[in-house]
Structures are given as structure tokens and as C-alpha cells.
Image (spheres, coloured by chain):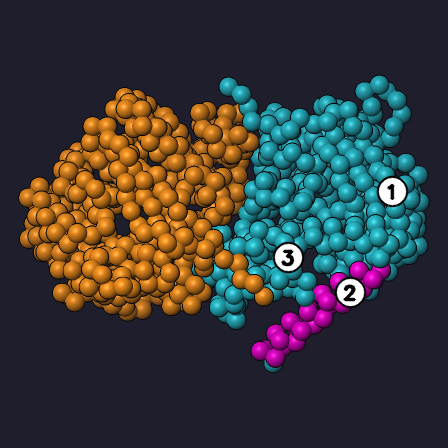
Chain colours: A cyan, B orange
């Protein structure tokens, strides 16, 4: 009996990042890896537990997504990385032909778990599913991510919450650096034994390790964290510890600073960000990669994205609205369905409501990124970003104004 | 702003049924209507409240479905037929380009509603959603279905439950005939005033009225009901009041009898049936149309259909099963995904589980119907039905045997 499988990986393609052009600090680039080429700046949809919630992988692919994120914490708990490894790895297990990045589980064990205890060795925590005890270390995070087979593996870092004691932020930076070295050592090297830090071909295609910068909203700590992790010469770097509750202005300042501290010839990934205006600001700062649960999570509760801000389509006011979700959107939902219909689906609790909203929202993000890339190629990013940001923020302001008027 | 819309109806195509061939009592035919041609025998997926649960209409279309069923009762309650009419009718509201049949709400007001009171005028009932009082009559059922714009409109009938007092079954037959005449009168006629019972072009395409036979499991009552409804010379007829709890042998006997009592040149629809072996038996009896919630409802609880019976894919035993859901299935789920993956999705309560199972199950039914049609064209239906029935029933027997062994 034949086994359904993802496209065979292009095993001979090493991971690479090519900077194709620059417009101000903003960068147009291309990632290559064993599971295809990815145009940057790129937005990665989040596929938490082996699926991008509410949609098929064909539908994800059709939005233009070519790189998605898998959550190590969730997959470790259910169905378990060993089962996925026995089934040929996460690409094949879930039937996704594109590229995969996995997070390290660090963010989840610090934020999702009810209880956790941090030591130099790692983090002890209880599962949010059944309360069972587990222990994560840098080494285990690498073992799990290598078992999952993701193209890009994220380092196991410590993220201090916003507003934490400054000494805790310092400790998190120091520990993140020490843990990164342990990640690199546990990650292994090329089969030929060549010294290529953060690169391994285990399993038939190259996987690479990205380091993560911490430092909260402290400029000096950001500089220190950047210096320490860049020294390890890894294939890519992420900015962690932002979008965790700090004010938007602080996030923007830190993004500007952080992007400039990372090597020019390597991809830069701003973790967990964000709304369209946050992404535009990130690109302006020189960020190449983004991920966020916003488009998928908001979709499931009946909120869709438009060029003019969020639209809470489940609301009564759209009950007879003949317009598509976003008049300028090229997605199949906007081509076929009205706001009135999508609103009805949420009212009637039909699963198709979350599905259509998710398809639209993911498409919306991919159209945003395509627009960003086109504007970069044509040297008009600043104007594009200014206009898109203004429309988004004006729409959001009008929406909030309406909410306030209805709930004085 | 342009409005997304279904393909414009082929308004000039009148409803017709062509008998293309016969093999024993089994029939190969073709329905034509304003929303396309439908090859028979046909299976109609159920689109209860404006969506076929858990899938997009593109996915329904891709299974080969060209005629789906909408539930008048549910759509009347939410979002309301008047809203749907204002939005251009049900085809356009839900974005379905194919043909539509709506039921009359009769079955639901008798079975779903907590309280109902039946008079000669109609049925008073309480909504299963909020307990509000409503009154359905033959005239209102026609008004709602004409507002929805379905290509095939079902008569408002009275279905006596299995095991009912024989006098109640007689009363239901008599009332069904009287109500059918009221449905015909309320349905209207062609715009040109020609006398074409059960045909109207209101709204731009022809809609037709199907009568429904009742009579429980009583041969004489079935003959009487058939005689009375056939006299009205409607464009099609359905067999109602089966698959409501009676033993399978009784259902099969009554189907054989009932199909033979209906006109040869008109489509015959067996309502609410059923499992693959029931459908094969229905085709053998001379039935052309089927609908059933089985494939969609079972899918949502983690049961998929295979040529060898049901497979409860959410069970632990499939946790590492590399095989597709059904080895002989040509659906995109079986091409891409394993039982292990689909099982994981149900374990993790990911919406993609019900979605993939629904795509597979609908595809399974359409493949069954395509196999039936091909065997009819080649004059080998009896052999096809015998083999498919034997495999299905042997698989089901083995499954039940396993269940009994595990739960002695």
C-alpha cells in the first residue's frame, strides 16, 4: 500500500538567504531551503498542533503561504514528537509540501503552563492539557525540533515578561546566551563533519538553527544580547521578547534598534508580530520574517481584516450587507461570498464561518506581504507603508470610535 | 461595488428528466434544471443552514456533487427566508453554483420541535432554538421555498412515525393528499398561464414541485397514497415515511413496492436514505435520487466510510496507521493524509478533522454513485451492487464483532 506523502524535499538545496535589494532599511530577499524558496519579507501562518486551524493545507497554500510555523510545545504534548518522527516528520505527517519553522517551546512553557520552575538546566512545567509534569531543556528542545524535521529550528530562550524586574531581564539575557550555546552544541553539525554552526543535514535535508535576541525594552541589554548571539555565527536571528505587553512605541523603538544590531547578510525574524501596521513598521526597520496568530485567531471569533481596519463581521450591522469582506481583496471568499452570508454562518455557529474568515485573513496577510515586496522592488516602500498604515489606523480609529459611541 | 454571485442560472432550461437506460428495475437518467444537469442515480449532500457543515462549497463541488439539499425549517428560523430572498435567493446567498432541492419543513416540525399541534390547517410548533411559537401550513412552506429559490420544491406532507396507530397512518395519508393539492394551488403556474401543474418560473428560472408518498409500512396505504398523488401529474415524486425506525427488511420491501407505483417517466426520490447498502437496494428498486445526513454527520464525530464498512478513525488503534482512510478512494484527503494524521486531528480537537472526514465521506458517496451509474451504463448493475453490498456488510459485521469483543 502506498503512503501519501508531501513532495519529496529538494534535499540538495542548502539553506541560504539572499538579499535582493534594499529600500531605506527595508529589505527584499529570498530564503531557500530543502522545502522550497520563500520570498521575503514573509509572513508565516501559525499551525499550532499539526494544522493551521480551520483550513486545509491546500487552502493555506492557495493563500500564497510557503513557510508556516509549527508549535513544538503543542506537538510534544500531542501527538508527541516521537510519533511524528516515526511517521516521517512533521512535513509528511501533516501533508504540508512547503517549508516549516518550529518554535522552541520556550515562549509556551513560560506563558501557557500553569506552573513552571526555571533553573540553569531548563524549565519544569505542567501541561495545560492534563497537569502532567514535564521538563524542557535546550537539549530536549533541539531533540524535539530535529525529530519534527522543521527546516528552521528556533533556539530555546528565556523571555522575561514586560514589566519584569530589571535584574530578571539581565538574567534572561545571560541565560539565553548560555542556552543558545547548548542549543548549538546539541544541534550537531553537517554529516561531513565540517564546522558549520547551526547547520545539520540529519534526515535528508538541511535544518538550520536561529538564535533569539532578548533584552526587553532596555537598549543596553539589547545591544549586549545581540553581540553575544551574533558571535555564534548562526544562519539566522530572531528578535524575541517583544509584543509581550509593552506599549507600541516601545515595541517600535526596540524593533528599529534590534534589527540594526543583526547581521546584514542573515535573515531577521520578529517573533509574534503582529497587526498590519506593526508588520509595516517591522519591514521599515529591516525585518524579513514575521509570524502571528492574529489572522487565524481573530477569524475564529468572527473578526476579519480589511485595508481599513478590523471588521467584526459577526455583528448585526452586517446582516444584510451585500459587500465582500474587503472590496479590494482577491481571495476566493471575497469573490464568492457577502458579509451577510459570513455573518449568518457565525450566527448559526456553522464551522464554515471560521473557515471562510481564516481563508480571507490569511489571504489578506499574504496580499499585504506581496504588496510590500512589490513596493520594495520598485523603490516605493516608504510611500506604500505610509498609505497602508494610514488607512489601517484611520479605519481602526473609526471602529473604536463606533464602539465607544455604542457603549458610552 | 460589485456583488459576488453564483453563476447566473441557465434561465431558459426547463426542468426535465430523461431516462437514459434501465438495468432490471434500476434506472440511469439525467435531470436538467435552471442550475445545471444532474446525472442520476444521484446522492444529495445535506446543506442544513446555508452550508454543508465543515466544508466550503468549492470542496462540495469538487466531490462531484451537483445537487444539494437545503433545510426549509432551519433556514426559516435562521437567517429567515425573507432575508435570503432580499439577498437574491439561496443559491446566491450561500454562493452555490449547482442545483438546489429544499425540503418542506414537514419532517422537522414533526420530529425536531418539542411541541407541535397538528390541525387540518397546518402545524403549530415551537422553535428548537428559542422556544418561540410558529405555524406552518402547506401554503407557507411553498411561500418559503419559492422565496429560497430552490430548483426542486418538496410538498408539505405529514409523516406518521414508525409504530403509529394504523388509524393515524391512514389520517396522515389522507391529509398528505389534501395538503399536496393545497401545495400545488399555492405553487402557482407558469408566467404564461399555461396549465403546468407544479411548475413555475417565478424569479427567473423554473422551479418544480415534487409530491411525497406516505403510507408507513402498509402496502394498501402505499398504493392508495401513490394513486392519489400521481393523479396530480407533478414533475417528480418522493417516497417519504421510510428510514424512520422501521426494520431494514420492511424498508426494503416498501421501497421496492413504492418505486414501482410511481410513474416511469418522472424522477423518484427516496428521502433520508441512507447507508451504502440501502442506496444500492434503492437503486435496484428503481429510485433515482437520495439524500442523507450520514456522511456529513458521521464525519464530524470521527467516523469515515470505506468500501469495507465504517472506520472509527478517532480510535486509538489508528494512532500510527500509515494507510489512507480508504485504500481505493480517489479523494484529496486519501491522496495526502494518513489515518494516523486524521486520528490526531480528532484527538487534538482540530476543526480540520471534521473537515477532512467530511470531504472524504462526501467523495465516498459520490464515487459510489459514479460506480452505480457506470455499472448501469454497462448493464452490470446487479453484479456491482452484489459485490459492493457484500463488502460493505462484511466489513460492518467484522467491525461490530470487534466492538462486541472489546465490550463483552
Residue A330 picture quarter:
bottom right
- Res. A19 mark: 1
Residue A110, can we see it?
Answer: no
On screen, residue A86 versus residue B389, left or right, reads right
Q: Most prominent secondary structure in the magenta stretch?
A: helix
Residue A214 versus residue B190 in the image, above or below = above
The mark that comes first in sequence, 3 or 2, is: 3
Q: Secondary structure at mark 3?
A: loop
Q: Position of residue B87 (x, y in %)?
A: 45, 65
Q: Secondary structure at mark 1?
A: strand
- Res. B371 mark: none
Residue placed at 22% from the left, 35% from the top?
Answer: B286
Mark 3 surroundings within 10 Å by alpha-carbon count, few (fewer than 14), some (14 through 19), many (20 or more): some
Residue, disc 3? A329
Give the extent of the magenta segment.
A382-407
* Callout 2 touching callout 1 (CB < 8 Å): no
Residue placed at 70% from the left, 40% from the top?
Answer: A67
Residue, disc 2? A387
Q: Position of residue A257 (x, y in %)?
A: 90, 55
Residue B77 versus residue A264 in the image, above or below = below
Most foreground residue, A86 or B379: B379
Residue placed at 72% from the left, 54% from the top?
Answer: A368
Q: Position of residue B238 (x, y in %)?
A: 22, 47
On screen, residue A359 versus residue B132, left or right, reads right
Q: Position of residue A123 (x, y in %)?
A: 73, 41
Mark 1 surroundings within 10 Å by alpha-carbon count, few (fewer than 14), some (14 through 19), many (20 or more): some
The quadrant of the image that shows the C terminus of chain B is top left
The mark that comes first in sequence, 2 or 1, is: 1
Residue A260, can we see it?
Answer: yes
Residue A313 versus residue A66 in the image, above or below = below
Amino acid at each position: 500500500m502506498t503512503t501519501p506523502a508531501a513532495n519529496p524535499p529538494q534535499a540538495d538545496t542548502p539553506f541560504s538567504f539572499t538579499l535582493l535589494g534594499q529600500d531605506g532599511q527595508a529589505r527584499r530577499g529570498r530564503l531557500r531551503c530543502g522545502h522550497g524558496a520563500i520570498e521575503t519579507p514573509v509572513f508565516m501562518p501559525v499551525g499550532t498542533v499539526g494544522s493551521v486551524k480551520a483550513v486545509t493545507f491546500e487552502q493555506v497554500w492557495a493563500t500564497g503561504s510557503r513557510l508556516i510555523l509549527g508549535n513544538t510545545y503543542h506537538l510534544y504534548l500531542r501527538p508527541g514528537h516521537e510519533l511524528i518522527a516515526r511517521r516521517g516528520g512533521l512535513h509528511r505527517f501533516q501533508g504540508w509540501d512547503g517549508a516549516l519553522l518550529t518554535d522552541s517551546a520556550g515562549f509556551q512553557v513560560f506563558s501557557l503552563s500553569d506552573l513552571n520552575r526555571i533553573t540553569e538546566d531548563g524549565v519544569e512545567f505542567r501541561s495545560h492539557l492534563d497537569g502532567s509534569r514535564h521538563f524542557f531543556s535546550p537539549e530536549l528542545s533541539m531533540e524535539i525540533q530535529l525529530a519534527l524535521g522543521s527546516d528552521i529550528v528556533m533556539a530555546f530562550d528565556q523571555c522575561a515578561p514586560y514589566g519584569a524586574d530589571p535584574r530578571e531581564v539581565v538574567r534572561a539575557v545571560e541565560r539565553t546566551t548560555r542556552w543558545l550555546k547548548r542549543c548549538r552544541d546539541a544541534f550537531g553539525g553537517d554529516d561531513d563533519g565540517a564546522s558549520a554552526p547551526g547547520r545539520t543535514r540529519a534526515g535528508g535535508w538541511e535544518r538550520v538553527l536561529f538564535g533569539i535576541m532578548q533584552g526587553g525594552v532596555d537598549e543596553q541589554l539589547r545591544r549586549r544580547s545581540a553581540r553575544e548571539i551574533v558571535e555564534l555565527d548562526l544562519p539566522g536571528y530572531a528578535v524575541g521578547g517583544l509584543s509581550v505587553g509593552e506599549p507600541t512605541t516601545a515595541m517600535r523603538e526596540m524593533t528599529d534598534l534590534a534589527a540594526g544590531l543583526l547581521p546584514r547578510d542573515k535573515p531577521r525574524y520578529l517573533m509574534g508580530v503582529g497587526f498590519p501596521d506593526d508588520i509595516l513598521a517591522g519591514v521599515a526597520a529591516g525585518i524579513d520574517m514575521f509570524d502571528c496568530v492574529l489572522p487565524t485567531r481573530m477569524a475564529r471569533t468572527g473578526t476579519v481584516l480589511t485595508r481599513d481596519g478590523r471588521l467584526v463581521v459577526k455583528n448585526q450591522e452586517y446582516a444584510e450587507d451585500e459587500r465582500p469582506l474587503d472590496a479590494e481583496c482577491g481571495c476566493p471568499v471575497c469573490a464568492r461570498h457577502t458579509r451577510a452570508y459570513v455573518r449568518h454562518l457565525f450566527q448559526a455557529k456553522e464551522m464554515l464561518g471560521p473557515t471562510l474568515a481564516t481563508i480571507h485573513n490569511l489571504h489578506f496577510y499574504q496580499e499585504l506581504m506581496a504588496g510590500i515586496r512589490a513596493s520594495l522592488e520598485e523603490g516605493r516602500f516608504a510611500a506604500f507603508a505610509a498609505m497602508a498604515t494610514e488607512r489601517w489606523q484611520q479605519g481602526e480609529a473609526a471602529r473604536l470610535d463606533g464602539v465607544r459611541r455604542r457603549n458610552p
